[in-house]
Image (tube, rainbow, N blue to C red):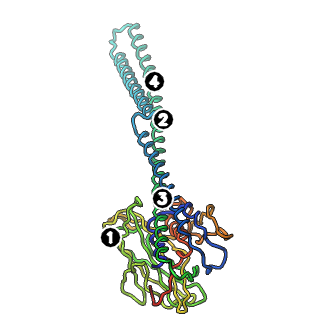
Amino acid sequence: MKIRRILATAVATAVTTPVVLLSVTPAIADTKPAAQTQKKPSVAELEKAAKAAQKAYDDAVSAEDVAYAAVEEATTDTTPLAVARKAAGKAADDADAAKTAADQAVTDAEAAVEALPETATEEEKAAAATALAEARAAAVTAAEAKTAADAKVDEAQEALDDYRVAAFTALSRATEATKKALAAKTAADEALAKAKEEEAEGGEDDDTCVPEAELTTVVTGLPSKVVAGTVVDFKLRVTNGTTKTMDRVFPFVYVHATDKSGHKDIENLLRLQWSSAASPQWNNVDTENYISAVSPLKAGAHADIKLRLKVDAAAPAGEGVTFVAGDYWNDNGTCGGSPDLTGYEFEIAPAGSKPGKGDAKPGTTKPNTSNLTPQSGASAVPATTGTLAATGTSATSQLALASGAAVALGAGAMFVVRRRRTGADV
């Protein structure tokens, strides 16, 4: 199996990789030449990572339960702030009724003054005027009381709203933390299962391929928002930035998508095809996410590959990411590939939505290495450069996962070839 396919599987099952998974990976990297072979984490180490990820997930579930209970309490009519808001409302209603009565008293007093006959005595006129003045003073007092009562209603309502918003915000964060913890647990479990499978099979027999940072893959023209039921065309450029010809270069393109919850995989509703100068018809990307080899790719040269993404009209709103990389194999047996998967994240909008503006961009978040532990004196430099997001950073979660999964799977997961090819492909 191609190791980059293993990495893609890990990518598809998580949104970010936690420090607990990285911290038990002993052979992160060294400042030695890129071609140096590095040790993969052992089954025991991956078991420790899986156990830590399970505990983190269990803790996250408990925290989410507490946050949910807090939301239920905050939304009841019996929570203290809700009771206070109700009392303020009752006082405001009473003040409003008093103001209405006072205003009516003014109206009645004015009518009494107007109704005085020409024969009214001075005493009668004075009494009517006094009654009107008192009614107007009472109306002013009632209006002021109503204004004060309304202000207390606003204060009580704002306090209640803030309390409830805080509860819902805490629940949202707890839910997101649970999603990430579950994704990390899934990735850790799968990495462990794969390691056990390889151990049972006796391992793979060739670790001679090297990471090659000068073999680059860049996507252009992929919209930041793709509408379900539409087809978008974009381009992949593979560049050999080295000083030597690469006999065969195998572009790697992998598209993954979930619904908005991040729990439901909708990858089956996306179809990716490619076309090149050598093969102008539209071809499906193979089952291991590879495109036919570019043969050869000279030093400093590049090859452009057209890509076409079709999103089924039934696809729900969600999030997608396109990962790209390049691998090479020379006739003399030397081989290697891009050290990292580069991810381009895009939004999936429901059918009928307006298309998005702007292209998807690769993430560039710097790695969080504070909890990485080197082995045998090796420095704690991560095996990726500039693509591993700090735990909890959602904006570049796809890159955090790609790089984190690569580290968790060992240096062998950072480039494709782990056994010698005998033909043009494996």
The residue pinned by badge 2 equals 155
The residue pinned by badge 1 equals 312
Front-most of residues 100 and 24 = 24
Residue 302 visible somewhere in the drawing: yes
SS under mark 1: loop
**Closer to viewer: mark 1 or mark 4:** 1
- Horizontal and vertical percent for residue 295? 48, 90
Q: Are marks 1 and 4 in contact (CB under 8 Å)?
A: no
Question: Which amino acid lies under the numbered mark 2 shown in the image of this protein?
Answer: Glu
| Quadrant placement of the C terminus | bottom left
Sequence order check, earlier mark of 3 and 4: 4
Sequence order check, earlier mark of 1 and 4: 4
- Horizontal and vertical percent for residue 290? 44, 81
Determine the residue positioned at 45% across, 75% down: 5
Q: Are marks 3 and 4 in contact (CB under 8 Å)?
A: no
Determine the residue positioned at 44% across, 74% down: 254
**Closer to viewer: mark 1 or mark 3:** 3
Question: Which amino acid lies under the numbered mark 4 shown in the image of this protein?
Answer: Val
Question: Which amino acid lies under the numbered mark 1 shown in the image of this protein?
Answer: Asp
SS under mark 4: helix
- Horizontal and vertical percent for residue 132? 41, 17
The quarter holding residue 95 reads top left
The residue pinned by badge 3 equals 180
SS under mark 2: helix
The quarter holding residue 301 reads bottom right
